[in-house]
Image (cartoon, rainbow, N blue to C red):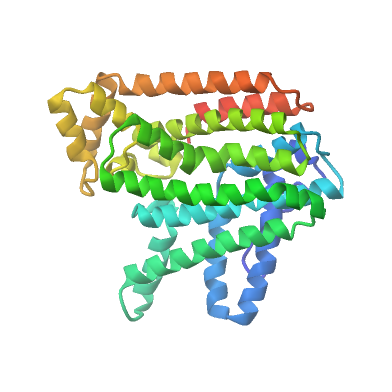
Amino acid sequence: MRASGIPVIDGPHDAPIDEALPAHVERALADYLAIRHAAMADQAPSFGTAVASLAGFVLGGGKRLRPTFAWWGWRGAGGEGSGPGAEAVLRAVSALELIQACALVHDDLMDASSLRRGKPTVHVEFAARHRERGWLGEPERFGAAAAILLGDLALAWADDMFTGAGLPAARQVAALPPWQAMRAEMLAGQYLDVLVQATGDESGAAALSVARMKTAAYTVERPLHLGAALAGAPEPLVAGLRAFGTDIGVAFQLRDDLLGMYGDSDVTGKPAGDDLREGKRTLLVSEGLRRAGAAGADVLRAALGDDDLDADGVERVRALLLDVGAVAAVERRMGELTGTALAALDGLELAAPAGAVLRELAVTATRRTS
């Protein structure tokens, strides 16, 4: 543990990056955050404490999927697996976790979520800090302000980490288009999510549009594009990887929707039924509304956006979605998307072992339990 409280990651230094990628990403993030925390703590000790909370959030869990897909896009397009160039790419793709931190911190605030990974969300943590110390003003407003600012800081530092990774100038220039597109698409997806809730759009097309922009683009498609661009991949290979990534990314979100409704909260780290209470118009909900009769649709609509929905209310909706075939329909759609994604992958000439790894990642992402 460093003096800052940010952990030192000791394990993976000598292990090949391919074999211990999440641990290498963790090390890169911990080293970067320790440097940035030290600088901020010197300038403004009180803000240094807030930065330590952000670092704890970033390093406190997560699957590291985005850097993983980016790394295997790099390797699949012929990028080397070791040496200074590979280490620079590792640092660059690790910056994706800071974009993810921004998205999660802001998403939790917009959704009024109380838990993330089994712990208080950032806005809840800072509201509690305000309350416990008897500060002036409203704890909730302070918590919201802190979450907005720390999410913004994570996004700014993502850019800094990416551009300061030590990439050759030509590689960095080649990777800028997917990097820039990914940031904008992530924010667009967040907006579409709240827009669909506000308008009450119940269509499957709207739900899939949110899944595509909010999750697929910046979780799988653009990370693969980024990695391939860093390796100088030709356009047909980039297009094939993006096609694979889009379908797997949407399937990933559909699995997330099912876990939000039926997953074990001890495993997912979020209360079951939160998507209902937040009024999320997911494909699962859209299929349920389309398939249920008038009475069933009324039950489902009454539950959507009900902050006080209790466990019995969640269970009624769960049973309804199963009974009308909505769950089976979403499972079928995930299977179709996974099939088309793997077909796109099979048509690509990737450097070994990237093809096999990406196939395994596709299965893992769409069959996960957390």
The quadrant of the picture occupied by the N terminus is: bottom right
Toward the viewer: 315 or 74? 74
Q: Where 27 falls versus 204 (above or below)? A: below
Answer with left or right where residue 355 lies relative to residue 204.
right
Q: Residue furthest left?
A: 295
Residue at screen point 82% across, 53% down: 168
Name the residue at 52% across, 70% down.
50
Residue 25 image position (x, y, % from top left): 69, 48
| For residue 51, above or below residue 336 | below
In the drawing, does residue 149 fall left or right of residue 11? Answer: left
Residue at the far right: name it. Answer: 83
Q: Quadrant of residue 79?
A: top right
Q: Position of residue 184 (x, y in %)?
A: 53, 51
Quadrant in the picture for residue 244: top right
> Which residue is located at x 48 percent, y 19 percent?
335
Tell whether 83 sits left or right of 185. right
Q: Which residue shows up at 70% across the image and 29% down it?
A: 236
Q: Is residue 210 visible?
A: yes
Can I make out residue 118 in this image? Answer: no
Q: Nearer the viewer, residue 167 or 53?
A: 167
The percent position of residue 36, horizontal first and vertical second, equals 66, 68
* Count of numbered tags: 0
- The percent position of residue 317, horizontal first and vertical second, equals 24, 31
Placement of 344 over or under 105, stated as above or below = above
